[in-house]
Amino acid sequence: MNPFTRAALALSLCLLAAAPAAAKPRACTSLPPDIREAMRTMSFCITAVDPVAECGRAGMDVQIFSNNEGKLPNAGRGQVYWEGKIRKDNGDAGLRRLVYLVNDGTKKTIAMRYYTPDHYANFCEIT
């Protein structure tokens, strides 16, 4: 590795290490009934071998959530965030989302659950 590449890599690692962790979101005080129903669906299908297919069969659109906004704590080793879109009656995805932190592995388990009513501007932790 040449000296320039080594220096760039070292700087990148220092910047990553210095990045502040996101504050823990406040606890959700209440959730709409349709969100509670979506939570039951997502809690079941997100731990399947193929969450996209299983949730799709249950009528929920899910995908990996990258936490680009940095509003949630960083996922740990072997963990991944999944996002579930809460669709309106007309089929539009709208602004509301469930985001689950899942321990990946042979048997997937849910580590944390979050809700955002405004497309990632604010999160609350579902306890």
Image (cartoon, grey):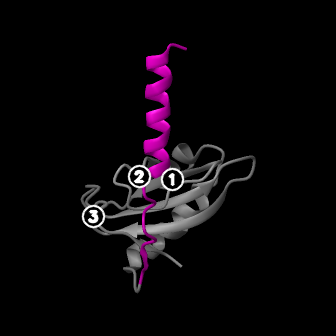
**Residue 8 lies within the magenta run:** yes
Please, is residue 26 above or below residue 59 in the view?
below
Q: Nearer the viewer, mark 1 or mark 2?
A: 2
Q: Residue, x 39% and y 74% (percent of image)?
A: 34
- Tell me the CA gap for discs 1 and 3: 17 Å
CB under 8 Å between discs 1 and 3: no
> Which one is nearer the viewer's eye here, 36 or 25?
25
* Residue type at tag 3: Ala
Dot placed on the residue nearer the N-terminal end, 1 or 3: 1
Q: Secondary structure beneath disc 1?
A: strand
* Residue at the image point whose x is 46% and y is 60% from the top: 21
Image quadrant occupied by the N terminus: top right
**Residue for point 43% across, 56% down:** 84
Q: Is the C-beta separation of discs 1 and 2 under 8 Å? A: yes
**Amino acid type of disc 1?**
Tyr
Quadrant placement of the C terminus: bottom right
Identify the residue position indicated by label 2 in the image.
Answer: 67
Judged from the image, the secondary structure of the residue bearing numbered disc 3 is loop
**Is label 2 in a helix, a strand or a loop?**
loop
Report which quarter residue 44 is drawn in.
Answer: bottom right
Mark 1 lies on residue: 81
How packed mark 1 is, by other alpha carbons closer than 10 Å (few <14, some 14-19, many 20 or more), is many
Stretch of the chain drawn in magenta:
1-28
Q: Camera-side residue: 113 or 17?
A: 17
Quick check: marks 2 and 3 in contact, CB under 8 Å?
Answer: no
Is residue 105 depicted above or below 33 in this figure?
A: above
Question: In the rendering, which numbered label is found on residue 44?
Answer: none
Q: Which residue is mark 3?
A: 121
- Mark toward the start of the polypeptide (2 vs 3): 2
Q: Is residue 61 magenta?
A: no
Q: Position of residue 7 (x, y in %)?
A: 46, 26
**Crowding at label 2, few (<14), some or many (≥20) Cα neighbours within 10 Å?**
some
